[in-house]
Amino acid sequence: MISCVVIASLTTHAGLRAFAQRSPDAGTAAPIAAGPRAVPRHLMPRRALVVLRAGPRRPQQIAPIGPAGQPPVAMRFAFDAVRHEYAMVPTSAALSKDGAFLAFLRGGRPMVRQLETGAETALVTGRMGDGVVSYSGWSPREDSVVYTLGTRDGLDTPVRPRMPAPEGVYAAAVSLANNAAAGRPARASVRADVRRLTLPEQSTPTYWASDEADTFLYVHHVAQYHDELRRVTHGNNAARTVYALRGGFWGISQWHVRGNALVFVHRPSSAARGAETITAVRLDERAPALRSLSTGDVLNAGPELSVDGSQVLWHAQDGGQRAVWVAPFDGSARARAIYRCTSECWARWESNASLFVVDSGALQRVFTDGRAPVTVVARDVELVIVAGGA
């Protein structure tokens, strides 16, 4: 989101300050007293939510992560179950970069909720019909979320499907406003300005680049053992090939871009099954070269770049036991297993110095400097959603 510290706990004070800053007519926030010395930016933890396991009489719940050792208090609102997907693909719930807004689905409809106030709005109105929504993620620079509206696949799908809006990719700029009448106490409401993006047909954006031009990257299958990573922008839908992968294939949904750094799972067409390679490439080089960080039986859950793009994590075997591995992006040091799982487990970067690991229903904070892991939540954790997406 640092050991034994409240993880950006979505406190009321911070939320009210954010509301005052976002809404000019909501009043002026009181000055905040100076606290302890700030944590260096590159070590700052990101906000996160845990998804708690459902029970026979309990639906799936989402909860903010609180102080280590204290059980999280679940939020009480209805939403579609968060899919258990840890490869680099969107899930049915995503946190904004600052952790203030949660994009989620309710009855298949895309919604956005401001976590502090509980205010929310729907991004699509009218009957959903045959429309199916998936989130592509939040913009790294501003509170805008991208989602794709497509047609439900199935034998019973009508020739002319019933859609609430045309198929395509949409961006919604989200803000918190005050909808109270003049002279009344501030009352929060979420506003979403939705626009349809101009992108090539049949292209599904997988990554939203951190610029002002609505730049998206996606993988295009050209031919057998030939895939290309392509770049396209809103307003100029002429796709440009950023990187071509020939003589092999990408791991299924296992690639991750942050800034100009790309990591992915690759297996040459001549290699045996179980001989995948964790590969790194910097996209601003004129002739980018594949750099192997590790070769072996890579498990289906990554890899992922750290917040600053300097490190990579992935999941693989270590002496027959599932483990979380970390290596520098530039290959300056050998990969090392920093956590050995007791059973099936999944990791996400919390900061550049720590990771969240969900292992046997417990949420652990694991440090890259070798310190002992700290148990954050002891049980009932299914997965963790980190602000800013993967």
Image (cartoon, rainbow, N blue to C red):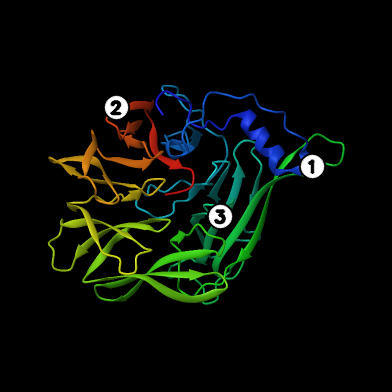
Residue 202 position by quadrant:
bottom left
Look at label 2 and name its amino acid.
Arg
The picture places residue 68, in percent across and down from the top left corner, at 42, 24
Q: Residues within 10 Å of mark 3 (few under 14, many from 20)?
A: many
Total numbered labels placed on residues in the image: 3
Please report contact status of discs 3 and 1: CB closer than 8 Å, yes or no. Answer: no
Task: Say whether marks 3 and 2 touch (CB < 8 Å).
Answer: no
Residue in the image at 42% along x and 34% along y? 55
- Eye-nearest disc, 3 or 2: 2
Figure check: 243 above or below 373: below
Amino acid type of the residue that numbered disc 3 sits on in the rendered structure? Val
Which of the two labelled residues, at mark 2 and mark 1, occupies the earlier sequence position?
A: 1
Q: Quadrant of residue 220?
A: bottom left
Tell me the residue that label 2 is attached to: 371
Residue carrying label 1:
25
The crowding category of the residue bearing disc 1, from other C-alpha atoms within 10 Å (few below 14, some 14 to 19, many at least 20), is: some
Distance (Cα) linking label 2 and label 1: 47 Å
Secondary-structure class at tag 3? strand
- Determine whether, in the image, residue 59 is placed left or right of residue 243: right
